[in-house]
Image: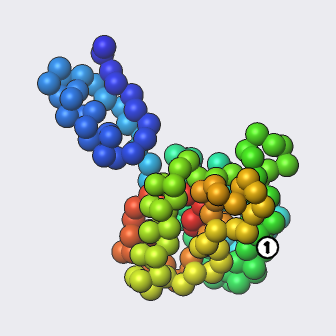
Amino acid sequence: VDCISFTGETTTGKAIMKAAADGLKEVSFELGGKAAAVIFADADMDVVIAQTIRSTFLNQGEVCLASPRLLVQRPIFDEFCKRYQAAAEALVFGDPLDEATSIGALVDKEHYDRVVSYIEIAKKEGARLLFGGDRPNLPAPFDKGAFLKPTAFVDVDNTMRICQEEVFGPVV
């Protein structure tokens, strides 16, 4: 093996790097992050809403290339937030194999609890919850799944954990 490539969580990446060091193996990692979408006042709002909803909530936000941070220029901030919230709340929960579904459950209960812990941390650190942050009211059999409403915070400072650490869930 000449090179080890890994996409995933940082703790696992560190373990792989330590193991690869003994054999001086090359490593290539994609360990998540906090990529931001920057939205300027002259943007086409219809296009921007559709693209940012997709980039933040596709696969419940469990995507390494998600855009979990949105930097919106002040002149359009209020309108953007209103339209973004409406689009997020229109997403359809359910079985991800059903084409009518927009958003499924998080991978498992443990991960659900981790994502919810980030929501609570954000609130404690002073971020303002714009929408979401709790379970949707779903019929059986989905009422037992690890479903979480799309969640958005505003008034976020770059020093907050929600802004520094990858949540890997439907949180922006």
Locate residue 99 relative to residue 22 in the image: left or right.
right
Q: Position of residue 46 (x, y in %)?
A: 82, 64
Compare residues 88 and 65 and report the one nearer the observer.
Answer: 88
Name the quadrant containing residue 103: bottom right
**Which residue is farthest left?**
22
Q: Position of residue 35 (x, y in %)?
A: 51, 56
Res 129 seen here: yes
Q: Quadrant of the N terminus?
A: top left
Q: Position of residue 152 (x, y in %)?
A: 61, 73
**Please, is residue 63 above or below residue 121 in the view?**
above
Compare residues 16 and 93 and report the one nearer the observer.
Answer: 93
Q: Quadrant of the C terminus?
A: bottom right
**Which residue is farthest right?**
100
Compare residues 120 and 81 and report the one nearer the observer.
Answer: 120
Q: Residue at x 14, y 24 (%)?
A: 22
Give amino acid for label 1. Answer: Ala
Q: Which residue is mark 1?
A: 86
